[in-house]
Image (cartoon, rainbow, N blue to C red):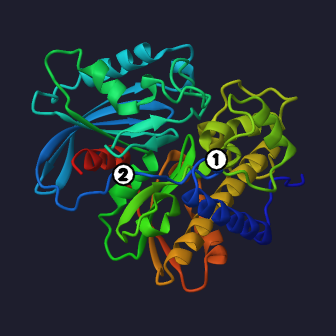
Amino acid sequence: MKNIFDLTHEELKVIANRLQVKIEEGIQKDGMEILGIPTHIVPSENISEGKVLALDWGGTNFRAAVVEFKKGKPQILEIKEIPLSAKETDGLKQHDLYSAMAEAIFSLKTLDQSVTNIGYCFSYPAAARLNGDAILLHWTKEIFITDMQGDNKQKDNPNNIVGESLVKHLNTNQDINFKNIKVINDTVACLFAGLSEQGYDAYIGLIVGTGTNMASLMRRDKIEKLNSKETGRIPVNLESGGFNPPYLTVIDNLVDATTNNKGEHRFEKAISGGYLGEIFKTVFMYEKIKYDFDGYDLSQLIASKDDADEKVQVARQLAERSAKLVAASIAGLVQELVRQDENTKKIGLAVDGSVFWKTPNYKNMVEAELKILLPVGVKVDIFPPMENPNLIGAAIAALS
């Protein structure tokens, strides 16, 4: 059958170039297609000792962990995980959400009164505050908490202050009094965790899981909307899943029409595990497909040895397109980093997410396309899989 999801090298180059333009617009002005959100937390290089609460909510599960630093090395003492996807949060209000989180947090046996700092990896579009907190801009990944910001019309709602509102709820527990919380995106957390790999001119954090996004360290004076003359680097959460790429298909439009944020995050909806299953089911809408077919099921099909099966072929086509689009997005960000500093030649890429690491041959497809799309003389090294980068990155943020 004809592969309607195929993208040529020339088309991918167009996507990379267009993304670069959108990134440049996003760091010049607020409210653009690529948000380019500066995170006012610079990772400390001098963390020696400390014990913190690290939280991670990325669209599927909520995780709470106690992380202890000894001689600068983080160790996760304990993790508690609960399902908190669109299905589990359907119809919830903020109080219900925080009560579920609090139950998980206070079940940690290694949590004690010495823990007063929280690092929270919050993987939804949020504007960073100067104090390290963040304000929710809108929901993605089909999550929608009704009394928290979700339509850009409640910007003065105190419930939208991500960290402060959670700490207020947690501190109703009289045994522990949390004093400080730092909120970062999962791509920034991944970026922080990857900084342990030294010797690179630039670093990128990438998520390809339930959703997709990128972050990088950029010089303050290159982020025009900061109006700063300082040359020190600051993490920038791009929210690149909001990119609207060319060359999407009618199938993509049909899937988009069924989502809570129709017309938005089209790049994410073509790439990530939260939507690949929906694309597949839409291709085969007139056939019997289980209603909860998802990214895991897609991976199982991709790994099948039945090369002649039409469903296997389509599953592989969707994975290949996803990998190629990810490569184009990396290339677009690399082009912007090189534009900002022409001496950028060697870039370290820290990646997290089940689609990237668990889809058969995915990493190899990304690397193959990058060899074609990257600027001449620029190399990107993909770091090996990291263990719990979101929790480690959140813990680093808590003590930075």
Nearer the observer, disc 2 or disc 1?
Answer: 2
Evaluate whether residue 365 shows in this view.
no
Q: Which is more N-terminal, label 1 or label 2?
A: 2
- Give percent across and percent down for residue 87: 56, 21
Q: Is residue 343 above or below residue 108?
A: below
Q: Assign a secondary structure to mark 1.
A: helix
Q: Please give the count of numbered marks on the rendered protein.
A: 2
Crowding around mark 1 (Cα neighbors within 10 Å: few <14, some 14 to 19, many 20+) is: many
Which sits in the foreground, 144 or 222?
Answer: 222
Q: Quadrant of residue 301?
A: top right
Q: Amino acid at mark 1?
A: Gly
Which sits in the foreground, 320 or 117?
Answer: 117
Q: Is residue 325 above or below residue 288?
A: below
Tell me the residue at 33%/77% (across/down).
199
| Label placed on residue 40 | 2
- Assess whether mark 1 and mark 2 are in contact (beta carbons under 8 angstroms): no
Residue pointed to by mark 1: 242
Tell me the residue at 65%/60% (across/down).
22
- Give percent across and percent down for residue 384: 41, 62
Q: Amino acid at mark 2?
A: His
